[in-house]
Amino acid sequence: MSTQASGRAASRIVVVGSLNADLTIYCDRLPQPGETVHGNSFAVNPGGKSANQAVAASKLGGQVSLVGAIGDDPNGAMLLESTARAGVDVSRVRRAADAATGVAVISVDAVGENSIIISAGANGTLTSADVQGAADVFNDAAVVCLCLEVGLDTVAAAAQAGHDAGATVLLNLSPYAEVPGALVGLTDVLLVNAHEASLFLGKEAMPGSNLDAAEWEPVRKQFADRGLQRVLVTLGAHGSVVLDSLAACTQQITLIPPTKVVAVDTTGAGDAFTGAVAARLAGGESLAEAAAFASVAAALAATKKGTQAAYPDTAEVELRRGSHARRS
């Protein structure tokens, strides 16, 4: 956790980015290109990576402020209500007069896998001016949480604001895009899945489901050579890996085993992971400790339909961790 010049410990999590209405169709299987399949049910839910991450962090005890943009429409109202109900400060979410609220069109199959297409809408109007207008919430920030569902200039401005405030800048490199070196240099913790890690490093594949620390050592070195000393790589049902080049030599690679659940809907599980990491880092935990907690939170999120409504609170996560420890 960062400490400001005044000596007062920072505690706030600032999330800058997207709010989307999730238009979700549940079906037996995802369609192939050019194919039409029958859906079983349809729902409109609050979503967007940044809104999801903010809600997840707030439910897990974080003091969260969200900076974003919505349209002046029913979907925007739904998103404001959902995030505020979870305890998120939404006073820096701007209503765009000339753009509709962003949407995501999602298909979810019978085993919880999904495909997603997003349309930015009002998210595309979020600029560095919005970041500057929210300067006060960065002053006591412990963590600034970012993704790539808004423009790179906006992400970079938020990363700079977080860096200048002494916060930990957590960048979720999703949806994947090439990012400038300046943004990489402002990133304290990079969070990627295995596919995004491969794209970023120019590798054909990650070690994947083979949770062998020795096989992850070259990956850690490659990230470090790119200026990223602390990286989380999520592996879906196979757990995650913490690559922390700032830790002691014997603790630079930590393998986080998966939490076994019956998945109903994996949409937003990665956002639950990111929000949980942010909450635990803001609470003073190490990166490995935060990832272990986040692994359970993300798994529990996948056991229910939807995103924000499916996210667990701290008591639910600790109960699952306790029952797992007893079984072990």
Image: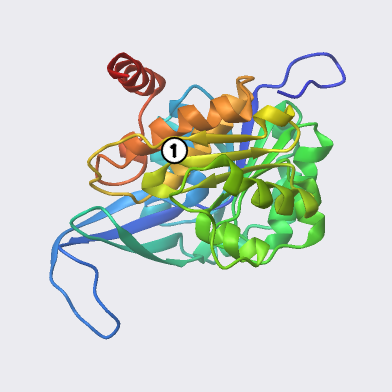
Residue at the (60%, 41%) spot, across then down: 15
> At which x and y percent is residue 306?
29, 47
Quarter of the image where one finds residue 170: top right
Which of these two is toward me, 25 or 198?
198
> At which x and y percent is residue 154?
70, 56
Residue at the front extreme, as displayed: 214
Q: Which element is circle 1 on?
A: helix
- Report the side of 188 relative to 81 (left or right): right
Quarter of the image where one finds residue 312: top left
Residue at the (13%, 71%) spot, across then down: 38
> At which x and y percent is residue 190?
65, 46
Quarter of the image where one finds residue 104: bottom left
- Report the side of 184 relative to 282 (left or right): right
Residue at the right extreme, as displayed: 5
Task: Count every numbered label the image shows and give the total.
Answer: 1
Residue 52 visible somewhere in the drawing: no
Under mark 1, the amino acid is Thr
> At which x and y percent is residue 118?
44, 66
Label 1 environment density (alpha carbons within 10 Å; few <14, some 14–19, many ≥20): many
- Report the side of 184 relative to 148 (left or right): right
Residue at the (66%, 22%) spot, across then down: 11
Colouring chosen for the image of the structure: rainbow
Residue at the (43%, 35%) spot, across then down: 257
The quadrant of the image that shows the C terminus is top left
- Report the side of 103 relative to 113 (left or right): right
The residue carrying mark 1 is 83
